[in-house]
Image: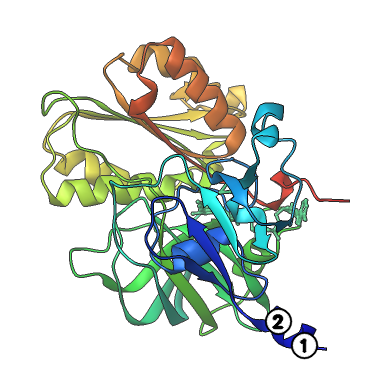
Amino acid sequence: MFGFFKSAQPKRVFIEGMDEPIEVANKETILNAALRQGVRFPHSCRVGGCATCKCRLTDGKVKELTESAYILSEQELDQGYILACQSVPKGDVHIAVDYLNTSGPDIKPTQHSGVVVAQQALTHDIMALDIELDAPLRYIAGQYALLSVPGRIDEPRSYSFASPAGQHGTPTVRFYIRQVPGGDMSTWAQGSVMNTQVQVEGPFGNFYLRESQQATSQPILCIAGGSGLAPIKALLEEALSFKNPRPVTFLFGARRQQDLYCLAEIEQLQQQWAGEFTFIPVLSEEPEASGWKGARGLVTEHLDRYCSPDSQAYLCGPPAMLDAAEAQLHQLGVSPDQIFSDKFLDKSNQQKIA
Ligand SMILES: Cc1cc2nc3c(=O)[nH]c(=O)nc-3n(C[C@H](O)[C@H](O)[C@H](O)COP(=O)(O)OP(=O)(O)OC[C@H]3O[C@@H](n4cnc5c(N)ncnc54)[C@H](O)[C@@H]3O)c2cc1C
Ligand code: FES
């Protein structure tokens, strides 16, 4: 008879090595609860598609929201690994996390109300939205926020900040949102959304410009596809404000000329950058007769020309493109710990539990 009261109680997650447990609200995932409480839990996609948030369940039970068996190995499943972003505790649980992030941005996420104050179509399928917040938001360029539209799209989606925030944060955040066929938020963003109230929570993520490993001259190699340009442009703009002198090569993969955007901003970056800055847009489906004189094909077909083994690589965009680029960077001798990628995975990468 006390079942109702029992289920309404918050569950606790004890993370090995941490003194205090975290509290998990009703129906909340372990990852969301951990991030909300400032734990630097490794994660990326939040939709069960990348396995970055895998952790070992050492005691207790969880409800899995989507199928993890396709992304975790048999051995990991036998050892009790689960995906924190897809696991809702059924009671108190104990977990062990292999690599809690002890370095990188340490800015506790905050929740903000905001209103859309500017909307601009950058291409036929990418929309820029400016959102004015109730208070300035601090983040490191490259990180992302969770965006929701109360009463319309309550389940938040991840979007990378498309411009830097400055030292003290910014009251207006900008996102570039590419339309995904059948997608709720990206279709919403294409409509008339000026003055719409939204919720923004952040920052999250571990994608940001690292210090040079060797000398100040370690080359930076950026590879972006589609709206993946947003965090790459933001982190280069932030680096520009610190007068970063490292050489940059930036490969931007798109289908046709109509899919290229922000070219003026990138040209400005190029002109103001303290070191060498090479920008190569690469088009995969541009008609032969169009007069396009730039690079053609896939970005991976151009990597061997622009990549040196001592490069530090930043990749952002569609998962298939990033997987191919990462594999090639390995072959070209780039150290795996010098490759940083942010895959724009969406719900179509989920495997539903039947
Ligand atoms: C860290 C991170 C940063 C990101 N940053 C950006 C960014 O800056 N810009 C950007 O454009 N995108 C970004 N994304 C992707 C973004 O979060 C959204 O996933 C994307 O915009 C699609 O959202 P949506 O609401 O339009 O689509 P959704 O409604 O989430 O649907 C996406 C696709 O999945 C299908 N689908 C829906 N539900 C299911 C289901 N249960 N099972 C299988 N398929 C399903 C839909 O039909 C559709 O094709 C980022 C993603 C991550 C992880
Ligand atoms: S963050 Fe959980 S699988 Fe990607």
Please report contact status of discs 1 and 2: CB closer than 8 Å, yes or no: yes
**Viewer-side residue, 341 vs 184:** 341
**Viewer-side residue, 278 vs 75:** 75
Q: Which mark is residue 38?
A: none
Task: Give how far across and how far down residue 258 sits, in percent.
Answer: 55, 43
Q: Amino acid at mark 2?
A: Lys
> In the displayed structure, does residue 71 sit left or right of residue 259?
right
Q: Amino acid at mark 1?
A: Phe
Task: Give how far across and how far down residue 145 sits, in percent.
Answer: 45, 63
* Residue at disc 2, secondary structure: helix
Task: Give how far across and how far down residue 261 sits, in percent.
Answer: 45, 47
Query: Does the beta carbon at disc 2 come under 8 Å from ligand 2?
Result: no
Using the rendered view, name the quadrant where residue 72 is placed.
top right
The alpha-carbon separation of the residues under discs 1 and 2 comes to 6 Å
**Viewer-side residue, 153 vs 36:** 36
Q: Is residue 128 visible?
A: no
Query: Does the beta carbon at disc 1 come under 8 Å from ligand 2?
Result: no
Q: Which residue is mark 2?
A: 6
Task: Give how far across and how far down residue 305 sits, in percent.
Answer: 37, 12
Quarter holding the N terminus? bottom right
Identified at 18% across, 40% down, the residue is 271
Q: Which residue is mark 1?
A: 2
* Residue at disc 1, secondary structure: loop
> In the displayed structure, does residue 213 sit left or right of residue 205?
left
Label 1 environment density (alpha carbons within 10 Å; few <14, some 14–19, many ≥20): few
Using the rendered view, name the quadrant where residue 139 is placed.
bottom left
Label 2 environment density (alpha carbons within 10 Å; few <14, some 14–19, many ≥20): few
Identified at 47% across, 67% down, the residue is 22
Identified at 50% across, 59% down, the residue is 14
